[in-house]
Image (cartoon, rainbow, N blue to C red):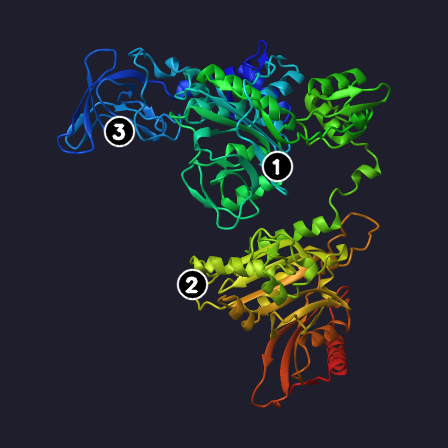
Amino acid sequence: MKFTLSWLREHLAGDYALEDVTATLNRIGFEVEGVEDKAAKLKGFSIASVLSAEKHPNADKLRVLMVDTGGGAPVQVVCGAPNARAGIKGVFSPPGTYIPGKNITLGVGTIRGVESLGMMCSEAELELSQDHDGIIELPVDAPLGVAYAEWANLSDPVIEIAVTPNRADGLGVAGIARDLAAAGLGTVVTPAVMPVAGAFPCPVSVGIAEGAPCPAFALRLVRGVKNGPSPEWLQAKLRAIGLRPINALVDITNLLTFDRNRPLHVFDAAKVAGNLVVRNATAGESLLALDGKTYALDPAMCVIADDGGVESLAGVMGGEESGCDEATTDVLVESALWEPINIAQTGRRLGLNSDARFRFERGIDPAFTLPGIELATRLILDLCGGEPSEVTLAGAIPDNARVIDFPLGLTEKLTGLVASDEEQVATLAALGFTVSGSGPVRQVTPPSWRADIEGKADLVEEVIRILGLDRVPSTPFPRDEDARKPVLTTLQLRTRKAKRALASRGMVEAVTWSFVPKAQAEMFGGGQPELALANPIAADLSDLRPSLLPGLIRSAQANADRGIGDAALFEVGQIFKGDRPQDQFIAATGLRRGTAKPDGTGRHWSGKAQAVDAFDAKADALAALAACNAPVANLQVSTDAPSWFHPGRSGTFRLGPNVIGHFGELHPGLLETLKVDGPLVGFEILLDRIPAPKAKATRVKPLLELSAFQPVERDFAFIVPRTVAAADLLKAAAGVDRKLITGVNVFDLYEGPGIDADSKSVALTVTIQPREKTLTDAEIEAITGKIVAEVAKKTGATLRG
C-alpha cells in the first residue's frame, strides 16, 4: 500500500513530521517497507521546450530536436519517441544526469553519426509509471528551466507499508489515518460522505442470479458527462503511487480504491445492451479485459453481463468493450460486494491480479457500499459534470454486527500490559468500536470495516497494538528449579541434532513439498483415501506424503538434469501414515546419488570413483541415530526392508519389535517407474520411535576413563552358513566380556574355492582393552577361546583353519 504524506494530511490533521508517521506505523502493526523521495531521485531534470524536430539523416525512426532548456543556447537532442515534435514541452535531462528507469548515467552520445547532448524523457525513464510509448508532454504554460520535480510537486514523500491479510481496512488512506489518530498522532478530518439526490430513476436495472457470490450491487447512471484528462492534482496523486492516469472517470475509481478502500467500476452506458445481471459464467464464455488480454471463463467465476454477453469479471477487472473513454457521455457507476473466496479463486485461476481483487479477496467494508457510490458521484459531477439518477440496489447490504463480551482485565492477563478501564475503552472507541455497559465486563461491537475481530483476544490485541508493546513490563524468570527446565521438547532436540549430524557428513538440507502424486504415495506405502487432499493446489500434489523419499528423489533428479549428478540431500520433516495423531511422524531422511560418498572424493584423478552403496546410507542413518542418543549398540538389523528398497541391498533398524527406520539401495523398478537415473541409496528413520533417554541422577558428564595399558587385537576367521548375518557374529563376540572387549569389526568376507558353496568366511578383529593390569598370554588365550566357543554356540560357526 502506497500513499503520500500530503495525501495522509487530507485525512489526518496535526503537527507531525514524516519520521513521526513512519515510527507510529511500525509501532501499530503497519510495517513501513520504504519511503521514496522522488525529488532527490529526479534532481537535474528540468522543463524544456522543443523548438524544432527534423528527421534524422541516417535513421527513419529518429528525429533531431533543438531543445530550449530555458538557460542559454538551444541544445541538440536525438530522440526516437513517436510524439516528439516541435512546440511541445517535456522533461529534459542533460549529460551527467542519472536516469532511474534505465539505471544509467547519461553522457554525451553520438547516435547514427549525430551528436546528442541530453535526453527528452518518458514517464518510465523517470519511474513515474510504466508508460514508455513517448516522451512526457507538459502543459504549454509549464515554466521553462524550472526543476520538473518541484513543478510537479514530486517533493512529497511516498510511504509504502506492508498490510497483513486480516487488515483490509489498512488498504485505504482513511483507514490508516484512523489508526494513527487512535495512536495519538493527529486528529481524523476525513470528510463525511453526503448523499447526492437523483434527478430521475436509473434506467438500467440489475439482477442477481441465484447462487451468484454477490450479496449486494448498487448502480447509478450519470448522463451528460464530459470525460477527458483528470485535473493535475488527481493525476499527481495517482502517479505518485505508481498508477498511470487514464481519464477522469477511471481516475476517480482508482482514487477511491486507495483513498477509501472502495473499489468501483464504471461502464460506458452507451456500450451496455439492456439491463445488467450478476451471474456465474457459462462454459465457453470469454472476456477481453481492460489489460488487453482475453480470458477464458468457467462456471465457477462470477461475471457482470448484459443482454449481449459478459461485460466485466466481477470484483477483478472490467471489460474492454464497455470501458469509458473520451467519447463517453453517459456512465454507469457500480459499487458492489463480492464473496472474498470466489474473488481469490477466480484471480488465482486466471493468474490475474488487480487492485480491486487485492481488496475484495481480503474483505472490504460492506457499510461503505452506498456511501462509496455517493462519493464517486460527487467527484464525477465536480470533475465531469452531468446529471445523476437515483441509486438502484440489488440484494441487501449484510449486517455483520456482533457483540463481544470483553473482560477488561483480560488485557493484563494475556499480555502483562497494565491499562486502566477508561484507557482501554477510549482506545477501542478511537478505532471505531462501540463500547457499552459498565463494570469489569463491557459489550463491544466491532465496526463494519473490521471483519477480522472475532473474539476477546482480538480486542486485547487492538488495545496492546495501539497503547504499545513498549508498555509491557519486562519480567525476569524466577531463579528456581522450574526456570531451568529445557525449553525444547525431546523431539525438537532430536530434529536439530539429526540435521547437524547429516550436514556434518556433507549432505545438503532440502525442503520439499508435503504433498505427492497419488501414484507415488502408493509406491511408498501411502495413498489411503483419508490422506487425499480435498482441494489440492495442483493435480500432481494430491496426497499427503507417506515418506520424505519421493521429494528427495525428485530433487536429486532435478539436480542431475542440471549437471549436478553427485547429490547428497537430506530432509527432516513430517510424514503421514494415517489421519490420526499417532499416525504422523517426524522422519529424518537422506539420499545419495552417483559418487556422492561420505568421504566426498567423487571423480578424481588420484583414484577410481566409486558409486554409493547401501553401507553409505546405513552409516548416514547410524550417525543421525547416534546424534539423537539412540541406543545404537543395541540396534538389530533385519533384511525385511519395505518394497521400495532393493531386496538384497537394504535393511531395517529394530529395537525388538519396534521399527526405527530403513536404509538401502532404492529398487531399480521404482527408479524406472519414476523415470529417475541411479544409483540412489537412502535411509529414513522415525525420530518419534527412538526410545526416550533414561533419567540421570546428575547432568554432569562422567569422567573420561582412559586405560594406561596397551590394547590387544586378535583376528578370527569363521566359516558360517551364507544365511547367517555378520551382525550375529559381532553380537556374540562382543557379549563374551563387555568390560574387556571394546570393539568388534568385520574386516574381510570371502566366498569361493576352498569353502562350500553354501558357506562363507567372515573375518573379525576383536579389540581387548585391559583395565587393571597387563594381560598375560594365558589370560588372552582364555578370552579368545571363549570368543570362539560363544560364536560357535550362537551362530554354528567354525574357526577357519
Q: Amino acid at mark 2?
A: His
State the SS at label 1.
Answer: loop
Q: Quadrant of the C terminus?
A: bottom right
State the SS at label 2.
Answer: loop
Above or below: residue 134 compared with residue 291: above
Q: Nearer the viewer, mark 1 or mark 3?
A: 1
Tell me where residue 94 appears, x and y as whole percent: 27, 20
Tell me where residue 151 appears, x and y as whole percent: 37, 13
As drawn, the label of residue 37 is none
Above or below: residue 758 compared with residue 237: below
Closest to the observer, 631 or 264:
264
Q: Give left or right: position of 479 versus 598.
A: right
Closest to the observer, 727 or 435:
435
Dot 1 or dot 3, earlier in sequence: 3
Closest to the observer, 137 or 186:
137
Tell me where residue 791 appears, x and y as whole percent: 73, 80
As drawn, the label of residue 81 is 3
Q: CA distance from mark 1 to mark 3?
A: 46 Å
Dot 3 or dot 2, earlier in sequence: 3
Task: List the residue tagged with mark 1.
Answer: 214
Q: Nearer the viewer, mark 3 or mark 2?
A: 3
Closest to the observer, 45 or 281:
281
Tell me where residue 508 appears, x and y as whole percent: 54, 53
Above or below: residue 623 compared with residue 672: above
Dot 1 or dot 2, earlier in sequence: 1
Task: List the residue tagged with mark 2.
Answer: 604
Q: Amino acid at mark 3?
A: Ala
Q: CA distance from mark 1 to mark 2?
A: 67 Å
Q: Amino acid at mark 1?
A: Cys
Residue at far top of view: 15
State the SS at label 3.
Answer: loop
Q: Nearer the viewer, mark 1 or mark 2?
A: 1
